[in-house]
Image: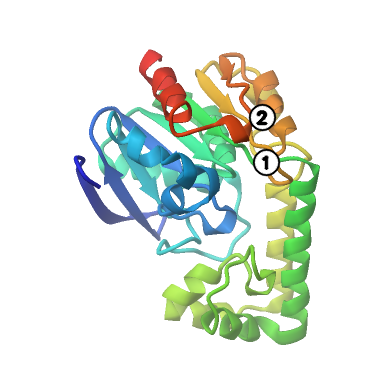
Amino acid sequence: MAGTQETTGTAEIDGLRTRYRVSGRGPALLMFSPGGFDSTLESWRTVGVYKRLNLLEHLSRSFTCVTFDRRESGQSGGRVERISWAHYVAQGVGLLDHLGIERAHLMGGCVGCSTVAAFGVAHPERVLSMVLYSPAGGVRYRMKQHARFQEHLAYVRSEGLAGVAALARGSEAGFTKDPRVGPWVSVLRTDEEFAKRYAAIDPERYATTVTGLVRHLFDRDTVPGPEPEDLLTLDVPALIVPGQDSSHAPSAARYLQECLPAAEYWDVPVAEQTRDNAPARILGFLSGV
């Protein structure tokens, strides 16, 4: 990236590898990537609205942007367990600790907004502010997530976990495009020992774990994550920017506006969010906190 410093590294957090990148200079901005179960640090430059707006390049001119592969994504590690939002928060906290950062601004894109909100609830003393960009949520979003996991478990019943591992390692599609490969697809491709252990898991136990995972992560028809009562008592300043499709319902952004007492809502449709106005709105918010 021209004009800014950029370093890439790995950290072990809760026994799992986390790949991260630090770009730019200035106050710390920890960024929770968009992309669902393929939330990688590259997503800020390659996915949808974030690519179109060139957000990372703009933000790194004034902030030290810390991006990373969410666990089970990209080159980060993973573990078969009933993953919760608390697990994702722990990864973010561990990364701040690894980098020696006591307090940071947080930014989430898409499903990253859920982790940012959960982080704020769990550790408000470490959060300077929150930017919640195009939060994932809504009725159709919840339905799509449950259907995706149901398709994956149907393939497990048909082909077994060894069949899932073989399919994952023989293709390039992610969980979103091909639910059969499951949410641990990235780890299956990058860690041969994990793939061997995965194939040997008892399928009934695996199905129980996955059923509990999806029931917990996607349990409501708005933004998943912390309970509304916890958000209602969270005084961390927040900027909310709405999305506008079946996975990023405008109602999801309005829900966060209703729940967060110190929230600003940027009421601009996605089509009118541009490289000129969107980075400037975020930078103005962050600089004013």
Label 1 close to label 2 by CB (< 8 Å): yes
**Residue corresponding to mark 1:** 248
Residue 219 falls in image quadrant:
top right
Q: Position of residue 45 (x, y in %)?
A: 42, 50
**Residue corresponding to mark 2:** 253
Position of the C terminus, as image quadrant, is top left
Instruction: Identify the residue at horizontal 27%, vertical 43% (top origin).
Output: 23
Instruction: Identify the residue at horizontal 50%, vertical 61% (top origin).
Output: 72
Picture disc at residue 186:
none
**Amino acid type at mark 2:** Ala
Q: Work out whether mark 1 precedes mark 2 in sequence or the reverse, and give the earlier one.
A: 1
Disc 1 element: loop
**Residue 150 in sight here:** yes
Disc 2 element: helix
**Amino acid type at mark 1:** His
Q: Foreground residue, 205 or 2?
A: 2
C-alpha gap between disc 1 and disc 2: 8 Å
Horizontally, is 154 left or right of 34 in the view?
Answer: right
Instruction: Identify the residue at horizontal 50%, vertical 54% (top origin).
Output: 39
